[in-house]
Amino acid sequence: AARPVDLPDINNAIGGDGSDIGAVEVGPLQPGPTFTVTNTAERDSGCTTDDCTLLEAMNAANAGADANTITFAPGLSGVIRNTLVPGGLNIIQPLTINGPGARTLTVSGNDATRIFNLAKGISATISGLTLTGGRASGSTFPANSGAAITNAGALTLTECTVAGNTASGHGGAIYNNGGNGVATLNVANSTLSGNVASGVGGAVFSSANAGQTTINLTNSTFSQNGAGEFGGAIYQDSNAAGNAALRVANCTFDRNTAAINAGVIYNDALNPSSTGTATVTLRNTILRAGASGANLINDSNGGGTITSEGANISSDSAGGDGGTGPGGFLNAAGDKRNTDPKLDTLKNNGGPTDTTALLTGSTAIDAGNDANAPAGDQRGYGRTGISDIGAFEFAGTLPVTLANISTRLRVESGDNVLIGGFIVTGTAPKRLLARAIGPSLPFADALANPKLEVFDSAGTLVGSNDNWQDSADQQAIFDTGIPPSNSLESAVIGSVAPGAYTAIVSGADGGTGPGLVEIYDLNRTVDSKLANISTRGLVQTGDNVMIGGFIVLGTRSQKLIVRALGPSLPVNGKLNDPLLEIYDGNGVRIAVNNNWRETQAADIAATGIPPDNDLESAIVGTVPPDAYTAIVRGVGDTTGVALIEVYALP
């Protein structure tokens, strides 16, 4: 179906059976159930393969009755603003939005309108986005509440930042509305900060009304949210006959304020003659008071309770007196009252969202309850020894990441040199070592004198070397502990900004033979990571097939998609039917695919990056930390140019 408006950047003609009638040629509509956003523009004229905004993708997802997924094109970053839909973008069908990372892509209400509305009875998951600039204004409730999101269904936020949203009513960021149904809010590994409500619930306002509300908070940070009345971070009520439940585990509440009372949580069962209940449970959580308002207030009226499951720290008395023992709300094993948790300010400590780090000497260190603690903290860093209280692990081990990637292939001349690609995502420069290996490989015909060149996405040469010991960075290469073992091999070392890069290995003297390109991550503590690796070259037979190696490091498993492309490549002599195999570190084949639609078709399509040709291969799955090898060969020992890619998925 053609769209009624001109679209920029779509060439005429783009293919198919013929050009469209009129002056504008449009691409085919994306069929779903996965829709890929290709740009940050604002318009609503149909989600095509060439051009799709977030609004267009959401409208396409809402048009059907099935569950859908929205992904974002690789490399897409910046800010998506909503100025076209007053009141916010509606989610009326089950939806998953997989963002590229909260530090990479922002969705904004442009300080004028709400960002999202989730309809009653509908489930939605949003991950890897920053939601900011939402505004709910006016004097009429509920239109003036929930500046970032109103939720009447089942909403899950993972690895998101929700910050700088403002409501003239309640719920500076989120209004969780039970109505006469069920509203569930799950927040994990996320940060809510700087949200403001003139009424109650600086970050979250949850009201069961005549229904039921449930909030589950895990490994998340609430920092400097503010309410003009009660509940600087969270206000929960049961209303007349509803049931409201709030469960908090391994969270950090830092300097949230309420002008009247309850800087952190206000729990209200409202009418004492009603049948409504409002319950709060806390474990492994830090409560650091702000400028005003006690940390916890329970306005029970007979139906409200706040219960500790142990290992909590409050900077005030939390409704009791003294530091430990009976009294107040925090009186279980490991609870500490009137105790300064010694927190740093909210900032980038690594990981997908900002966190509030524990300072040296904090009483939260090694004081958590391991039986209830998740394996990693909010950043994804592993919890070591006895876990710490709160969302931040003081001595956490590095999170999962792709590292030390390599591809071996026979290097030819011309277009059949060895071409490796990699993408660095995040906000900080990453220090890498690229190596081109040949003479030290155990092959009689190995590439004798490899030359290495590294280009950025604009095609600018950012580094080159022929013979690493002749490099000006020879000492730095040696100091890595992994210099090439032969003086004729090449290496480039340096820090690169987030972006896409290409490493090309060729024969310095026009020579040919098996060669190896490698990329090593030299600093995995900064806020950036290798998110995608790829290699293109000529696949032959025997020992000269394409062999890619990658390592998953960390404490958790990583979801990946590995693709072997050939027929869709815009080159001559392409591999017409690639076969893909993956082996673990013990040499055991753990997966194989020939023609991606024959196995895992739905899972591969849901990633948003399925191969373009049915004869191409792909494997998607979650793998534990280990070294892996991916092999691409031609079905029936055919040969040709192929591309292997490994993507880390959310």
Image: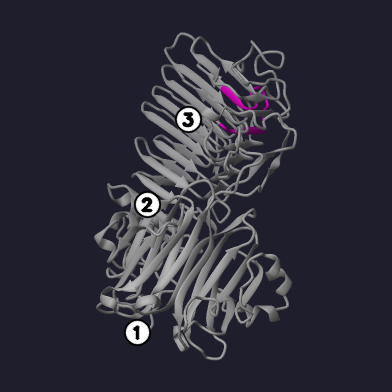
Check disc 1: other Cα within 10 Å, few if <14, some if 14-19, many if 20+: some
Tag 2: Cα neighbours inside 10 Å, few (<14), some, or many (≥20)? many
- Looking at the picture, tell me which residue is in the foreground, 182 or 171: 182
Estimate the x, y position of residue 54 in percent, counting from the top left.
44, 56
Q: Secondary structure at mark 1?
A: loop
Q: Quadrant of residue 543?
A: bottom left
Amino acid of disc 2:
Thr
Residue drawn 52% across the image and 29% down it: 372
Q: CA distance from mark 3 to mark 1?
A: 57 Å
* First reached walking from the N terminus: tag 2 or tag 1: 2
Residue 553 x/y as whole percent? 53, 53
Q: Closer to the camera, 594 or 437? A: 437
Q: CA distance from mark 2 to mark 3?
A: 24 Å
Looking at the image, is 496 positioned above or below residue 98? below
Crowding near pointer 3: few (<14 within 10 Å), some, many (20+)? many
Which one is in front, 77 or 528? 528
Three-letter code for the amino acid on which mark 3 is drawn:
Ile
Residue 39 position (above or below residue 60): below
As drawn, 462 above or below 304: below
Magenta stretch: give its range. Answer: 250-266
Mark 3 or mark 1, which has the lower sequence index?
3
Residue 58 visible somewhere in the drawing: no
Label 3 belongs to which residue? 215
- In the picture of the structure, the residue carrying the numbered disc 1 is 573
Q: Position of residue 323 (x, y in %)?
A: 71, 17
Which of the two discs, 3 and 1, sits closer to the camera?
A: 1
Please tell me whether residue 340 is drawn above or below residue 618 in the rendered image. above
Mark 2 lies on residue = 69
